[in-house]
Each structure stands twice: as C-alpha cells, then as structure tokens.
Image (spheres, rainbow, N blue to C red):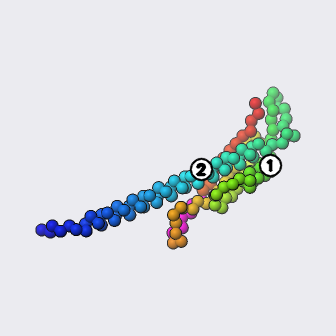
Amino acid sequence: MRTDESGSTLLLTIFYGVLALALVLVVTSATSLYLERKRLFTLADGAALAAAESWRLEDVRLDGDALAFGLDEASVADAAAGYLADSAHSLHELELVHAGSGDGRSASVTLRAVWHAPISTDLVPVTVPIEVTADARSVFH
C-alpha cells in the first residue's frame, strides 16, 4: 500500500486555477459584448429619435381634428447619418445599415458594428458582428 501522496493536490490546484481563469475570461467577454450591444442600441435609439424629428414645418397639415405630417425617406436617412456623424462613440466599424420611414410617421434605424473581445491574441482573434434596430415616432398632441 502506497502512502506517499505528495503532488496529487498540485495537479488538482492547477486544474481548478485554469478552470477559474477560463470562467473569468468567458464572463468578462460576455459582459463586454452585452455592454457593446447596449451602447450600439443607445446610439441607434438617438439616431431614430433625431430622424423622427426631422420633419419640416411646411410638411405639417391639418387632417380632420389632428395635425399630421409625413416623413420622407431622404430626410430620415440624412438626419440619422448627421446624428451619427456628430456623436462620439468607441464602436468599431460602425455602419448605418438602414434608415427609413415605412408609414411616414415613424423612423426606423438599423446600425451594425463589430465587437472585439477584450482579451484576444493574434492566434485567436475574437470578433462578433452586432446589429440593432430602433424605432421612434414623433407625435403631436
């Protein structure tokens, strides 16, 4: 019967250390991806709001008892692009995929960016494209 067990806990300690390090890296990367998506959505929401407010006073008309206006595709796209040009952000490869108004009263903006993992190497670069869509509507009361 062998009673010398020196070194058996060292292997177990190394295994749990590597497992803990891998868990920390995965949680860090998942959190970073979530925050990057939230930043992109916030930017898309602001662009959609700016685009929904891009109507001109000449376009307002009386429709029964309510005021109405129509957003055109060109003004929505220009307002969204202008908002993105003026905004400060740290998003990689930001792209305005679509900006338009399907019903003439609301604006829809779709943005795409690329997320880079916070800890990556040249051997294993980790990037994920993310895309969000935000809608906004301008309403008269």
Q: Position of residue 109 (x, y in %)?
A: 70, 49
Q: What amino acid type is highlighted by mark number 2?
A: Lys
Q: Residue 38 bears which disc, if any?
A: 2
Please say whether residue 126 is one of the residues in the magenta stretch: yes
| Residue at x-position 34% and y-position 65% | 14
| Residue at x-position 63% and y-position 52% | 40
Please say whether residue 125 is one of the residues in the magenta stretch: yes
Q: Position of residue 44 (x, y in %)?
A: 67, 49
Tell me if I can see residue 120 in this picture: yes
User: Image check: 20 left or right of 87?
Assistant: left
> For the view shown, which residue lies furthest in the bottom direction?
123
Work out whether residue 131 or residue 29 is closer to the camera in this orientation and state it: 29
Region of the chain picked out in magenta, as a range: 124-129
In space, the residues marked 1 and 2 are separated at their CA atoms by 26 Å
Q: Secondary structure at mark 1?
A: helix
In this rendering, the answer to whether 43 lies above or below 68 is below
Q: Secondary structure at mark 2?
A: helix
| Residue at x-position 69% and y-position 47% | 46
Q: Which residue is denoted by mark 1 in the rendering?
A: 75
